């Protein structure tokens, strides 16, 4: 299932991306979004609340371009994954999300990758200052983490930076 393509502004990408507190801080959405509806129609019931939570946080609307991977049967007992493309003035991004039903409910993880024209050092100081733990994986990759299950990787990309934000939801 694919929704229409949506061009996001740099501000909307950055608002989602630079949230140092991760997905757990988002307010519950009152309206079921189209990605959640499609997942439920495929039989993804145990993880429907997590699909709604993650997809709302990532900004899914009727105009979002989404590629869904249909879970194996029985759908409610197998993993479900999605990929969403985002684009704006010279900035591209992709969000990937995985949902895993379990006897205890549903576990989920997402990755948001965005190429930004801003240098990594500036992103670190302005967008991710709240993330205290910093580890240099090498001279071009920095890993940042906070108190929750969120991590950010800043990868030097010419004069800009590729920022990769990941979070796991138990």
Image: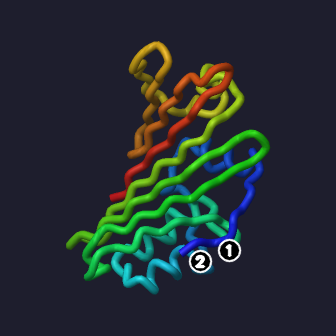
Name the residue carrying label 2.
34
Q: Percent from the top left, x then y, of residue 53?
A: 50, 67
Q: Where 18 sits versus 72, above or below?
A: above
What residue sits 68% from the left and 74% below the top? 62
Residue 34: x, y in percent? 59, 77
The residue most toward the left is 103
| Disc number for residue 51 | none
Q: Which residue is drawn at 45% across and 58% down?
A: 97
Q: Quadrant of residue 101?
A: bottom left
Residue situated in front as seen by the camera: 34 or 129: 34
Mark 1 and mark 2 residues within 8 Å of each other at the beta carbon: yes
Residue 57 appears in which quarter of the rendering? bottom right
Crowd around label 1: few <14 · some 14–19 · many ≥20 (10 Å): some
> The residue tagged with tag 2: helix, strand or loop?
helix
**Dot 1 corresponds to which residue?**
62
Residue reaching furthest to the top: 139
Sequence-wise, the earlier of marks 1 and 2 is 2
From the viewer's perspective, tell me whether residue 6 is left or right of residue 124.
right
The vertical placement of 80 against 18, above or below, is below
Identify the residue shown where x is 41% and y is 64%.
81
């Amino acid at each position: 299932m694919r929704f229409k393509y949506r061009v996001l502004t740099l501000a909307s990408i950055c608002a989602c991306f630079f949230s140092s507190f991760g997905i757990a801080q988002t307010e519950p959405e009152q309206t079921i979004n189209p990605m959640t509806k499609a997942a439920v129609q495929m039989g993804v019931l145990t993880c429907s609340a997590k699909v709604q939570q993650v997809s709302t946080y990532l900004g899914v609307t009727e105009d979002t371009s989404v590629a869904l991977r249909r879970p194996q049967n029985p759908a409610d007992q197998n993993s479900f994954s999605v990929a969403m493309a985002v684009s704006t003035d010279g900035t591209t991004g992709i969000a990937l999300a995985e949902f895993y039903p379990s006897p205890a409910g549903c576990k989920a993880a997402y990755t948001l990758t965005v190429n930004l024209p801003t240098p990594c050092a500036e992103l670190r100081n302005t967008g991710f200052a709240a993330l205290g733990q910093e580890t240099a994986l090498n001279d071009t990759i920095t890993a940042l983490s906070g108190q929750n299950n969120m991590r950010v990787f800043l990868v030097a990309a010419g004069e800009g930076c590729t920022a990769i934000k990941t979070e796991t939801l138990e």
